[in-house]
Image (cartoon, grey):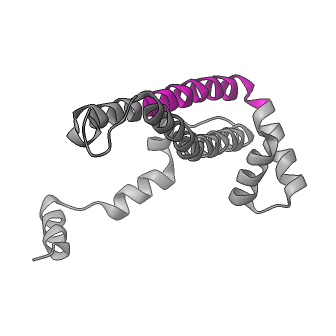
Amino acid sequence: FVSRNSFIMTAMYGPGFCRASSMAFFAIAHNLAQVATVTFLGDIIMRFGQLLISALCGLICWYVLDNDPKYQFGGEKELSAFWFPVLLCMILAFILARSVLAIYDVAVDTILLSYCQDRKRLDLRGKIPTEDELKSSQRFNTFIEKNKMTDEEFNNQQTAYSIH
């Protein structure tokens, strides 16, 4: 668990593995409730996803074998029992679903660590500014005044960038 998060921190910030391990550990430790919740829900989603994918693949395999005449009694590739090919299909689907959903799990961990780091940076900066504080700040007002445009200017800009 720590090594995967260390690799994520290395990809995000570029420190060495030991420094990234320390950063990942403290990011997780400071946001333990969020990490536990997301990890728990992610594991449930992954397990249900694996079971759903393997069950659907098993049903599709059974449907194809049951409705194709060449697998029926007297057919060119007659099967005495459908259970072995269906079970094999379900096992392979479970393995593939586990591999594909592992990518989903790494993506969720990456987003979670990004959230933890963003929260840490906002805490270090002080407090998160409210919308009223942003609107009253001088930089925000200067930005709005500098980039203000009329509806006619906006429409002209849209037609200039449109592809004909």
Front-lying residue, 49 or 58 = 58
| Spot occupied by residue 4 in the image (x, y as percentages of width and height) | 74, 47
Q: Is residue 157 left or right of residue 110?
A: left
Find residue 118 and report its horizontal and vertical position in percent: 65, 43
Decide: is 20 above or below 78.
below
Task: Kindly indicate the quadrant of the structure image that contains residue 121.
Answer: top right
Give the residue furthest to the left: 164
Q: Position of residue 153 (x, y in %)?
A: 17, 67
The C terminus is located in which quarter?
A: bottom left
Residue at the outermost right position: 18
Query: Which of these two is toward me, 67 or 105?
Result: 67
What residue is drawn where x is 16% and y is 72%? 162
Task: Indicate whether residue 147 is drawn in magenta.
Answer: no
Against 36, is 72 above or below? Answer: below
Q: Magenta residues: mostly which secondary structure? A: helix
Q: What are the residue bounds of the magenta stretch?
A: 30-55
Number of numbered markers: 0
Work out whether residue 3 or residue 157 is closer to the camera in this orientation and state it. 3
Q: Is residue 7 left or right of residue 140?
A: right
Q: Is residue 43 above or below residue 61?
A: above
Q: Nearer the viewer, residue 129 or 96?
A: 96
Q: Position of residue 78 (x, y in %)?
A: 32, 38
Q: Residue at x 82, y 46 (%)?
A: 23
Could you tell me which residue is drawn at 13 percent across and 64 percent down? 155
Say if the magenta span includes residue 41.
yes
Residue 117 is drawn in which quadrant?
A: top right
Kindly identify the residue that appears in the image at 26 percent across and 34 percent down.
Answer: 72
Image height check: is 140 above or below 68? Answer: below
In-image side of 21 versus 34 (left or right): right
The quarter in which the N terminus is drawn is top right
- On screen, residue 58 versus residue 35, left or right, reads left
